[in-house]
Image (tube, helix red, strand yellow):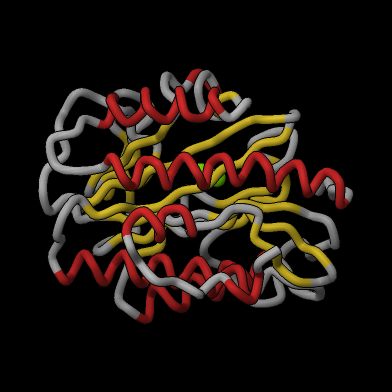
């Protein structure tokens, strides 16, 4: 069952999502070769708590940390550790926050220093595919329209779209109905309703779409061990249109990147 939110609830959700956005912006400044993912995890937990929220992932389904940190061939759900980041790597950081009983959930794949042109392109296309999906989150459309748009764009570039992990509704629980796959058929699936809130989150692989899991029971990685990217926004359906609850602005600002791609959907 899809749980729609009132304008007041959407405002609270925006507050939670923006705490995550700010956390990712803070991490963007700290992320450099030599820094360990566990050190970044501790910084994030402190930052989230300083903003009056609780880390959304810590303890969720018994996850041990505040951030999912998934470098290179890891797709999602990587566990922070002591290993220092290295020049030329990529790292997908997924972060959650809970405040006023509402969750924010939002992810970005960062470059550690300079990366190869091939990997750079993967990040660019995955991020663009997120917006292709958000474009379709509007009145009259269905879940399949979002998935179709993401899949079409990513596959056009020869990439693999992960099937086993999907976006989701979000609210007072992290994962609500509906599931939001990053693949699908136009006009299929549940119809979008005013006031619904979802996390749209393409996971796109440089090579095969196939994945495997490490024995830690968490880490998902590509079967061919080629790199994978993950970008996620929380979005509300307001006046029939997608409105971003989260923003990459803090990241772009920290990295000195110009971006106006979100403008049509700004609150
Ligand atoms: Mg997430
Ligand atoms: Mg999510």
Give me the residue at 14% from left, 60% from top: 114
In the image, taking residue 108 as reference, residue 83 lies left or right, namely left
Can residue 3 be seen by looking at this rendering? yes
Closer to the camera in the image, 77 or 102? 102
Q: Position of residue 70 (x, y in %)?
A: 31, 41
Q: Position of residue 90 (x, y in %)?
A: 23, 51
Can residue 223 be seen by looking at this rendering? no
Q: Position of residue 197 (x, y in %)?
A: 73, 52
In the image, taking residue 97 as reference, residue 76 lies left or right, namely left
Q: Is residue 59 above or below residue 165?
A: above
Give me the residue at 42% from left, 30% from top: 44
Give me the residue at 31% from left, 23% from top: 216
Closer to the camera in the image, 89 or 224? 89
In the image, taking residue 107 as reference, residue 13 lies left or right, namely right
- Quadrant assignment, res 215: top left
Q: Position of residue 221 (x, y in %)?
A: 29, 44
In the image, taking residue 202 as reference, residue 173 lies left or right, namely right
Q: Quadrant of the C terminus?
A: bottom right
Q: Is residue 82 above or below residue 67?
A: above
Closer to the camera in the image, 101 or 183? 101
């Amino acid at each position: 069952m899809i749980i729609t939110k009132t304008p007041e609830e959407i405002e609270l959700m925006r507050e939670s999502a923006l705490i995550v956005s700010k956390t990712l912006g803070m991490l963007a400044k700290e992320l450099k070769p030599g820094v360990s993912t566990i050190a970044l995890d501790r910084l994030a937990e402190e930052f989230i708590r300083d903003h009056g929220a609780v880390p959304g992932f810590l303890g969720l389904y018994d996850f041990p940390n505040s951030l999912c940190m998934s470098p290179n061939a890891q797709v999602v759900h990587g566990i922070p550790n002591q290993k220092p980041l290295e020049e030329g790597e990529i790292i997908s950081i997924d972060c959650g926050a809970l405040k006023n009983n509402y969750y924010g959930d939002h992810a970005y794949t960062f470059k550690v220093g300079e990366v190869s042109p091939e990997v750079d392109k993967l990040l660019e296309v995955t991020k663009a595919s997120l917006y292709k999906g958000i474009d379709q989150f509007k009145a009259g459309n269905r879940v399949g329209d979002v998935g179709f748009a993401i899949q079409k764009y990513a596959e056009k570039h020869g990439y693999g779209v992960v099937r086993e992990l999907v976006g989701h509704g979000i609210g007072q629980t992290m994962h609500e109905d509906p599931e939001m796959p990053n693949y699908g058929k136009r006009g299929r699936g549940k119809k979008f309703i005013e006031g619904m809130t979802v996390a749209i989150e393409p996971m796109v692989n440089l090579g095969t779409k196939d994945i495997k899991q490490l024995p830690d029971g968490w880490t998902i990685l590509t079967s061919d061990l080629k790199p994978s990217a993950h970008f996620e926004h929380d979005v509300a359906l307001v006046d029939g249109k997608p409105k971003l609850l989260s923003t990459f602005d803090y990241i772009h600002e920290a990295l000195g990147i110009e971006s106006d791609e979100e403008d049509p959907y700004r609150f």
